[in-house]
Image (cartoon, rainbow, N blue to C red):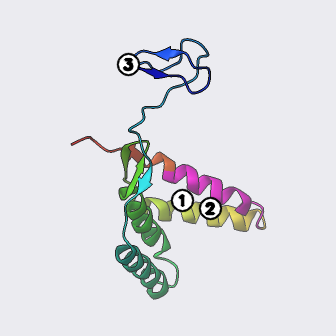
C-alpha cells in the first residue's frame, strides 16, 4: 500500500490523484535522464560546427535540427521518449522571415526570435511510439 506524500492518505493502485488533497500522483518508475555518451556528443557538436563554418552560417538551421534531434533521441522524460521531426528547410524558411522582420523593425523583433524558435522546436516534438 502507498500513501500520498503530501497529506498521508492511503492510495489505491493506479490512482492518478489523491482523494484526500487532490495532489497529482506520479508513478515511481517514471524517471527522467539523458543517455547520450561523451564521444557521440562531441562528434555531433563538431559536425554541426563544421556545417555552420563551411556554409558561412547558412547551414545553421540544418545543423541545429541535427543537434536537437540528437538531444531529443537520447532524452527520457518521466519515463517517456520523444522524437523530433523538424527539418532544416522548414527552419530555414522561418529564419528568413525572422531575419527580414529584424531588419524591418531595426532589431526590435530579435527579442521575439528565441521564443518563436522554442515554439517551433516544441511543435516538432512528439511522443515516441512504445516498442
Residue 75 location, x and y as percent?
41, 55
Mark 3 → mark 1, Cα distance in angstroms:
47 Å
Residue 48 location, x and y as percent?
43, 77
Q: Is residue 117 magenta?
A: yes
Residue named by callout 2: 98
Magenta stretch: give its range: 107-121
At 71% across and 68% down in the image, what residue appears?
103
At 57% across and 57% down in the image, what residue appears?
117
Residue named by callout 3: 13
Q: Are marks 3 and 1 in contact (CB under 8 Å)?
A: no
The crowd level at tag 2 (other Cα within 10 Å; few <14, some 14-19, many 20+) is: some
Q: 30 above or below 39?
A: above
Could you tell which of marks 2 and 3 lies nearer the N-terminus?
A: 3
Left or right, 100 with respect to 96, comes to right
At 49% across and 73% down in the image, what residue appears?
60
Residue 102 location, quadrant? bottom right
Main SS of residues in magenta: helix
Residue named by callout 1: 94
- Which SS class for mark 2? helix
Amino acid at each position: 500500500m502507498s500513501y500520498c506524500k503530501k497529506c498521508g492518505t492511503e492510495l489505491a493502485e493506479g490512482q492518478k490523484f489523491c482523494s484526500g488533497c487532490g495532489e497529482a500522483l506520479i508513478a515511481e518508475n517514471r524517471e527522467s535522464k539523458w543517455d547520450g555518451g561523451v564521444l557521440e556528443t562531441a562528434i555531433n557538436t563538431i559536425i554541426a560546427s563544421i556545417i555552420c563554418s563551411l556554409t558561412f552560417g547558412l547551414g545553421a538551421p540544418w545543423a541545429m535540427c541535427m543537434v536537437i534531434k540528437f538531444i531529443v533521441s537520447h532524452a527520457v522524460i518521466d519515463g517517456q521518449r520523444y522524437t523530433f521531426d523538424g527539418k532544416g528547410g522548414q527552419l530555414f524558411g522561418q529564419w528568413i522571415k525572422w531575419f527580414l522582420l529584424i531588419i524591418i523593425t531595426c532589431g526590435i523583433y530579435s527579442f521575439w526570435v528565441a521564443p518563436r524558435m522554442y515554439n517551433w522546436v516544441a511543435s516538432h516534438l512528439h511522443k515516441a511510439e512504445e516498442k
